[in-house]
Image: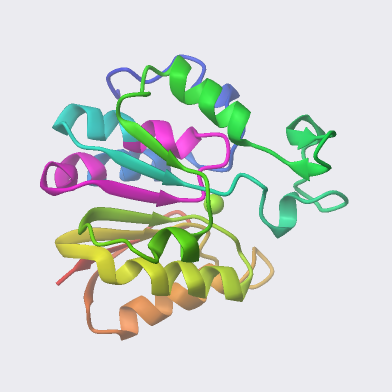
Amino acid sequence: MIPGLPHDIDQIKGFLAEDEAAALYQHALETSARGPVLEIGSYCGKSTIYLGLACRDTGSTLFALDHHRGSEEHQQGEFFHDPELFDQGAGLMDSFREFRRNISAAGLDDVVVPLVSDSETTARHWRTPLAMVFIDGGHSLDAALTDYRCWASHVLRGGILAIHDLFADAHEGGQAPYAIYRLAKASGLFADLGQVSSLGLLRRL
Ligand code: MG
């Protein structure tokens, strides 16, 4: 049981299994007293709430990075497109309004700092070591590589790098997250903590 977890957490749009959510919470709880946590790909805030609750417990901060214009698979005509998250006026996806509503309802406004931008722009002047980085952004190879290159080096020693949507079999899902997971493991910078469902966990040496 996670203290403060909204009773309607399952109503929040998103793609996160219960065991993965619990693992994110636990690792954030164990590491975030040492520094802030960064999440890449917040969408409507489901994983943000789990990480944010842990950060609240330790007095830490969660940076929630997402341009909120949706990944490739969220665009109009794509499989995961959600018309409720489409801004007709702008003609673009916009998950930020829904995100902000969910974070506020969870009482996490003073823990979660939204970064409404892309990885590259946000990372350009980033200097703060991070206790945990959770990569759950775009699933194109380009997007996943950018997220990895921008953020993996900011994980402090003993900190956690978590990567979502790992599928060894290409029939189960895209291979880009798996590609950066393999890169991280081959880098010699991380100890492999194994997987919880499709969530890969690594500890910075
Ligand atoms: Mg994901």
Residue 70, percent across and down? Answer: 67, 49
Q: Which of 128 and 137 is in front in this view?
A: 128
Residue, far right:
77
Q: In this view, does 116 lie to the left or right of 32?
A: right
Residue 91 appearing in the image: yes
In this view, 185 is above or below 71: below
Residue 169 appearing in the image: no
In this view, 2 is above or below 147: above
Q: Which of 73 and 154 is in front in this view?
A: 154
Q: Give the range drawn in magenta.
A: 28-51
Q: In this view, does 200 lie to the left or right of 128?
A: right
Q: Is residue 191 magenta?
A: no
Residue, far front:
125
Q: Quadrant of the C terminus?
A: bottom left
Residue 105, percent across and down? Answer: 47, 15
Residue 47 picture quarter: top left
Name the residue rendered at 57%, 41% in the picture. Answer: 43
Name the residue rendered at 37%, 20% in the picture. Answer: 5
